[in-house]
Each structure stands twice: as structure tokens, then as C-alpha cells.
Amino acid sequence: MYNQSLSVVVPIYNDQEVIPELLRRLTAVLETIVREYEIILVDDGSRDSSWLVMQEERAHREHLRIARLSRNFGQQNSIAAGLSLATKELIVLMDSDLQDRPEDIPTLIDALLEDPNATMAIAQWEERKDSRMKIAVSRLFQRVSNSITDIHTMPRLGIFRVMKKSVVEELRRFPEKTATAVSLLYFIGNKYVAVPLKRDARFAGKSGYNLSKMLSLTFARIFSFSMFPIRLVTYMGALLCVGSMIAACGLIIYKLVGNVVTGWTSMMVLMLFLFGLNFAFLGVLGEYIGRIFLETKQRPNFIIEQVI
């Protein structure tokens, strides 16, 4: 038995088939390792019967707290909502699909308590039963993040982790609206330990993470924690100016010696290239300006409609 109390935060989205088994396995583990615990399920605007199933489970589980968001705010915001409700000394964050195994929670806690300087113990996947596309995008995300942002992480880290309450309290001090909760946990700079674990296949249903959502998370981290895109635009603009001046000098020389260049093909190709590049530059600027706009409005990242 651990002396610390424990909160387990799980975001829920269209998981009606998983919830009973998730709670059964979680309860079986937690009853044997801690005397005081709470399980917090956050329904992120599910379209199936997840909320009804959560209410049914709550009726006979005294340690269960359930929260319902007013609409679908996305996994990262539902994680933030769950962390805002957590009250215990140690906080577990995990996915709902049972790819993160509840039976591995003691392994994470042991790793955290063994290192007095660590504030998080994070699952590092030795093996994961996901699609090749999802694995490839995850690897690309980690490499890009390490290369061009201020956040540097070890490879193959998951959401599954155990944290000290101090980390979550620090996270609550960040008023940012466009950065994700997990990215901010890394940005805070607390020391963490990586724990090698195996990731199971989904218990039921299918993943809600499609390519669009994965790319959205990638862009959120890049534009929230890096100036690389806008600096790249600056460098490319400078190189184009230099190249244009060199080309202009060459055309003037050709004109003076009587070699007039005829035809419109090269000019049209150059114009189309420059226009396309110009719109790309505007897009990068728009990303940063749009995030400034969202930050200044100070709208909440989530709205909790009900807590039971």
C-alpha cells in the first residue's frame, strides 16, 4: 500500500462499450495499492450513451466522480478539465480505451517514488498495437517537436503518466488558451522518468484520432512553442530578394548586349511560384496572429456542465 492518495483522470469520448471494463480493472488495482482514491471520468460531449453509462456506474461506485462538458472540446481540453477537478497527492492521467493498462499504474508510481527529484513518471512504449500511420505520425511529431520547439522529449512517450500534485497546481497557473495541456506539462520543465511499458490494442470501438487531429496537435505545439516557422519565412524572403536582384542584374546585362529573352512561360512560372510562396507566408503569419487573437479573448478552453 502506498501512503499517498490518488486521483485517476480519464477523458471519455464515445466509449460506452469500454467504461464498465475500464472501471472494473481500475477499481481492482486501486483497491489493492491505496487507501484513498478517486476516479474522475470526463465526458467530452460524447454522441453515444457514454454519459448514461457513467451515471449508472456512479450509482454503485462511491469513489467515482463524473463530469460532463457542455460540448466536444477535444481530448486535450477534457484532460485539462479533469486535472482541474483532481484533488489527491498523486494524479494518474490515462486514455479510456484500455490501451493504457490500469495494472501498470503501480509500476509508474514505483518509478516516480524511487527518484526524489522526479515529478512525473511517463509510459514509454516498448510495443504498441496501433496502425502504422498512427505510429509514423507520432514519431514524426516527436522529431519535429524536438527539432524546432522549446519542448524536448524522449521518444515514444504516451499520455499515460503519474504526476505529483505540484505539477498540476503549476499547470493551473498558465492562462494560455492555444497550448495543449500535455505540451504545457513538458514546458514547465519538471523532471520526469520514462518507464518502458507495452501498449495493448483497443478494448472496443475505434480511435477518434484521425490524421487531421494529429496534424492539429502538431501545429498547436509548433506555433505555441516555436518561432521557427516565422523565422523560416524571413530567411526565405531574404533569399528570394537576393535571388531576384541577381536575376534582374542578369536580365539587364542581357538587354545591354542585345540578347533579349523572349517568351512568357518562364515569367508565368516565376509569378505563380512567388504568389504561392506569398500566400504561404501569409498563412504562417495568420497562424500566429490568430493565436494572439484567441489569447486576447480569454474564452475558457472547456465548460463543465455537470459534476456528479
Image: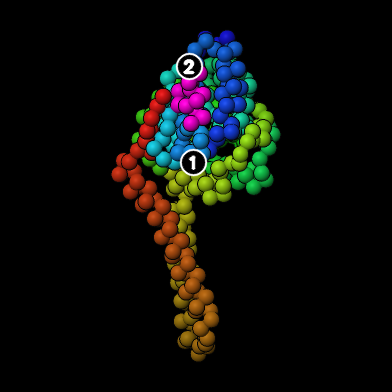
Secondary-structure class at tag 2: loop
Q: Would you place residue 262 above or below residue 301 in this image?
A: below
Q: Taking 1 as reference, is 260 above or below it?
A: below
Residue 77 in percent (x, y) is at 44, 37
Q: Is residue 175 magenta?
A: no
Is residue 57 in the magenta section?
Answer: yes
Badge 1 marks a residue whose secondary structure is loop
- How many numbered circles are shown? 2
Q: Range of the magenta residues?
A: 52-66
Q: Which residue is mark 1?
A: 47
Query: Relative to the observer, which residue lies in front, 15 or 134?
Result: 15
Residue 35 % position (x, y): 52, 10
* x 37%, y 36%: residue: 303
Q: Nearer the viewer, residue 256 or 104?
A: 104
Whether residue 153 is visible, yes or no, is yes
Residue drawn at x 44%, y 41% as measured from the top left = 72
Tell me the kind of residue under disc 1.
Arg
Query: Is residue 148 among what the camera can see?
Result: no
Among numbered discs 1 and 2, the one appearing first in the sequence: 1
In space, the residues marked 1 and 2 are separated at their CA atoms by 26 Å
Q: Looking at the image, which residue is at 55% across and 42% down?
A: 208
Rendering quarter of residue 20: top right
x and y, in percent, of residue 46 in the image: 48, 38
Quadrant where the image shows the N terminus: top right
On screen, 221 above or below 104? below
